[in-house]
Amino acid sequence: MKYISSNLERRFATLSFKTEWIILTLLTLLIASLSIAPVARLAMTALMPEGQFSLNWVYSVLAKKQIFTATLNTLYIAVFSTILALVIGSAAGFLTIFTKMRWKQAWIFAFVLPLMIPPQVTALAWVQALSPSSPLLTYLPFSFSGGTKHPLYSSTGIIILLGLYNAPLVYLTLRATLRRIPADLLEAARASGAKPWATMLSVVLPLSRTGLLAGAALAFVSAIGNFGIQAMLGIPARFPTLITIIYQRLNSYGPTALSEMAVLALFLTIIASLCLILNSWLANRSDVRVSGLGQNMVWDLGKWKYPVEIAAWGFHLITLVLPISALIASSLVRGVGQELNFTNLTFENYRQALFAQEAIRNAFITSFNLTLASSVVIMALSLFLAYFLSWQKGLLSRLLQVASELTYALPGIILGVAMILFFLKPIPILNVSIYGSVWIIFAAYISNFLALCLRPALSGFAQVDRSMDEAARVAGAGFITRMRTIIAPLVAPALVAGGILVFMSALNEIQVSILLVSSSTRTIGPMIVFLEEGGSSALAAAVGCLIVMVIFLLMAFISLFSHKLPKGALPWQN
C-alpha cells in the first residue's frame, strides 16, 4: 500500500509539474507575441525600411523642419506640464497625509477622478467650459466675446490640462513614499521646535525625493504620449507635436508612410525610455533609506483649517465641477452657443447618442464587449502570471514581468503603431489577418492593460501563505485544482480590483485604439474626437457625459467593497 501511495504521489507531482510547465510556456509565448514581438517589429521597420539597416533613412525623417518643431513642442509641453503636475500632486500628497483635513477621503476621490476620465473627454469639457459660445458662461461673471480665439487652443492650454491630468499620477506615486517616513524623525523635528513648514522642507521633502522623481518621470512620459489632450487642443491650434504627427501620418499614402510613422514612434519611445532611465539613475544616486516605522503623525491646521479646506475644495470646484458642468450644459442645448434655459433644454443629444445614431451605438457596444472580454482574459492571465512571478522566481519570471510592464509604460499610440506593423500581414501558419478588425484592438488591450491588473494580483499573492498551496500539493491536488479551489478564492478580491481598473481604463481608451479603429470597427473613445472634428459638439458632449457617468458609477460601486480589497488596490483610497 505504501508503494502504491508513493507511486500515485509521484504521478500526481509529475502531472502537476507538466501542467505548470505547459501554462508557463503558453504565458511566455503569449507575452512575447503581444509585447516583445510588436515592439521589435516597430524597431525593424524604422531602422530597416528596405530590409537593410539604414541610419541615413532615420536621419532624413527626423531632420525635417516639421519634425524638429514638433519635437521641441513635445519636450516643451512635457517639461512644463510635469512641473505643474509636481506642484499640484505634491501639495495634494502633503495635505492628505500630514494634515487633519475633514472629508479627506471624498477629496481624494474627487482628486483622482479626472485620471479615470478619458483625456479627450477632459479636453472637450474644458473646451466647452471656456468657449465663447459656452451656455454655462452666461451665468458666470466673466465671458469671452464672440470671435475671440479659444484660450485653450495654445501651448499654454495644453500645458495646463496636461498638468491637471497628470497631477494624480504624481500624488499616487508620492503617497507611498510619504507613508514610509518614520514617525520618530517627525517627532524629533517637532521636539527641536521646528514648525510644520520647516519640518516639511527640512525632513519630509528630502526623504520624499525618490517619490517625487518617480512621479515626475510618470508625468513626463504620460504628457508626451497623451493623444487626447494634444489632439483636441493642438490640432485646432496648429501646434504640432510628435504624437499628433504620428496620427496624421497614418492617413498619408505612399511607399514610405508606414516607415516614417515607425521612425517617429521609435523616436518617441527613445525619449520616454531615456526619461525613465534618467529617473532610475537619479533615484539610485539619492540614498534616502531610513529605519523605523512609517509615519502616523498629522498636524492640526489650527487657524489655517478653514482657509486650507476652502482652497482645497475650491480647487475641485474650478478644475472638476466647472468643466463637467459645462459639458453637461453643452449636451442639453439644441445648438452650439445657445443659452441653457427651459426653452432650449433638450435631451435629444442623449437620444441620438443612445438610440438614433447607429455608429455611436455600435461604438458603445463594441467598447463594452471588448472591455469586458479583455478584463476577463487579463484577470485569468494575471492569476497564473502572478503565481509564477511570486512563487517561481527566476530569470524567466523576471523577464516576463519586464515584458508585461513594457507596453504599459510606453505611450499608447506607440503600441498602436507597433500592432499595425506586426499584424499588417496575415499571421503565419494560420494565414489569417486581423488588421482592421476588432481582434487587433483586443490584442492591443491585452498587451497594454495586463500590467494594470498584474500589480494588484501580485499584492494579493504577497498576502497569501504559500504553505496552503504546498499542503494541497502534498495531498495530491493538481495545479489547476489548487489554483481553482485554494489560490483563486484567496486572491479574488485583488484580481477583481485589477479587473475593474482594466475595465474603467479600457472602456473609454483612445491612446491605443485611435490608430486601430476602422470605419466598420470603432470604439467609443475615438468617437468623441471624430464627432468634435465633424462639428457635432453637442452630440460629442452628450457622449462625454455618458462616459463620465459610467466611470463615476463604477468607482462608487467598487468603493463600496473596498474593505474586502487589499490595502492600496484602489488608487482613490487613502
Image: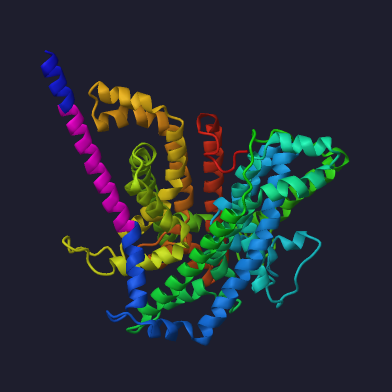
Does 162 appear above or below 393?
below
Q: Position of residue 194 (x, y in %)?
A: 84, 42
**Residue at figure coordinates x 81%, y 61% from the top left:** 141
Question: Which residue is outermost to the right?
Answer: 303
Find residue 464 and report its image quarter: top left
Q: Is residue 393 visible?
A: yes
In this orientation, which residue lies closer to the viewer: 82 or 228? 82
Q: Position of residue 542 (x, y in %)?
A: 55, 57
Residue at figure coordinates x 54%, y 68% from the top left? 532
Q: Main secondary structure of the magenta part?
A: helix
Residue 251 is at least partly visible in this image: no
Q: Which corner quadrant holds the C terminus? A: top right
234 lies above or below 11: below
Assess whether residue 15 is covered by the magenta stretch: yes
- Residue shown at 55% from the left, 78% from the top: 70
Residue 398 x %, y %: 38, 48
Residue located at (43% from left, 71% from top)? 265
Magenta residue check for 37: no
Q: Position of residue 244 (x, y in %)?
A: 50, 73
From the viewer's side, name the closer residue of 506 and 205. 205
Q: Which residues are magenta?
A: 11-34
